Amino acid sequence: MSTLSQDEPHTDLPLPAEAEKQREKHFWERAVVVALLGLGVLVALGSALLSISHAPTPHEVPLAYVGPAETAAALSQQAGQALDIRTYDSRDAAVTGIGRMEVYGALVVGPDGVELLKSTASAPQVASTLTTLVSQQSTAGTPTITEITPLPAGDSGGGSLAVMIQVTVLVGTIGSVGLGRLVPRYRANWTRGELPVLFLALYALCVGASMAGLSHAFGAGDHVHYWKLALSLALVNLAVTASVSGLVCLIGSAGAAVGGILYFLLGLPISGAATALPLLPAFWRDFGQALPPGAAATLLRRVLYFPDAPIGGPLLVLGLYAGIGVLVVGVVNLLAGAHHRNSLADLP
């Protein structure tokens, strides 16, 4: 039977009572900090998400109007803050405004009666809300409803857009985490600084091509040219992957958590992909459009359903996130290589 030598630690021996109490005290001190942190996140994130979705109501929904001024004034007064009445000269001009996403629908009042031009593709919830509001508030009679931009048969429920953005953002975060795992094992070299950037670009193209292929396969986007959709999705993925990777380069693994919370947990609900922008509170609506998921929702909705609508705004937002992220990753790699560091993980 062997005995413990004097050099071996006596790990199974009980601690003195005072040391045991001290260890228990340290445990509860740290447990309280963890609990407070969790409750803080619960209050902050729960309040934010509930304020977004607890009672979606229309806020200044842009509605084109063609007809007598007195009817427009009466409708505006009755609808209050729910509608933003915009006067157009003719029905054709209102249809053009819908196609450019200047308005979500149009009310045409003429000698032959009242016609509501609705645009389900712009937002199914808003189209339904406009139908209800105009039917209840119109003083010129019950409107005839005409669909201007219906959803395609392959996406009759209108949920494909939200799914495409959700998946693209999620795999973008995965790509950032994957690059973060590669970085500590990658020997930084200023003469080969393009490798991390090349990975981001190739990964984005693969994601865009794959997601566009799935969209075509299920009939949700087969009416759009394949590469137009694929490149749009690739830009969305690059904006997420590059910006989160840049955060990881600057603040370490916490950058991935920041990106996940800001883009996935918070960014998706306020993007306008699942809940229409006019149904969101003004602050969240504007903030959401400044994040990649919100810009992605606007870009893809226009690419898929409104080819005449301008796309410069969302392209600029996504391009800035992608460009700044790529720049940060490239500069960190350059600095690491110039200082003969083993990897990007050594900086900053």
Image (cartoon, rainbow, N blue to C red):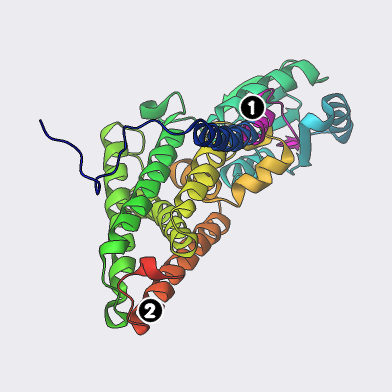
**At 78% across and 37% down in the image, what residue appears?**
85
Give the number of the disc on residue 36: none
Residue 241 on the magenta span? no
Magenta-tinted stretch: 43-66
* Chain-order first, disc 1 or disc 2: 1
Determine whether the residue tagged by mark 2 lies in a helix, strand or loop: helix
Q: Using residue 235 as the reference point, say whether residue 299 is left or right of it.
A: right
**At 31% across and 76% down in the image, what residue appears?**
193
Q: Using residue 290 as the reference point, say whether residue 199 is left or right of it.
A: left
* Near-viewer residue (245 or 114): 245
> Within 10 Å of the Cα at label 1, are there few (<14), some (14-19), or many (20+) other Cα atoms?
some
**At 76% across and 26% down in the image, what residue appears?**
111
Give the number of the disc on residue 334: 2
The residue carrying mark 1 is 53
Q: From the viewer's perspective, is residue 128 above or below residue 301?
A: above
Q: From the viewer's perspective, is residue 242 above or below residue 218?
A: below
Q: Using residue 348 as the reference point, say whether residue 127 is left or right of it.
A: right
Q: Which amino acid does label 1 sit on?
A: Ser
Residue 45 on the magenta span? yes
Determine whether the residue tagged by mark 1 lies in a helix, strand or loop: helix
Name the quarter where the N terminus is drawn. top left
Q: Quadrant of residue 91?
A: top right
Q: How far apart are marks 1 and 2 (CA)?
A: 44 Å
Q: Position of residue 171 (x, y in %)?
A: 35, 45
**At 65% across and 19% down in the image, what residue appears?**
144
Q: Quadrant of residue 57?
A: top right
Q: Where is residue 112 in the image (x, y as percent from the top left)?
A: 72, 23
Q: Position of residue 99 (x, y in %)?
A: 56, 43
Q: Position of residue 230 (x, y in %)?
A: 33, 50
Q: From the viewer's perspective, is residue 212 above or below residue 74?
A: below
Q: Is residue 299 visible?
A: no
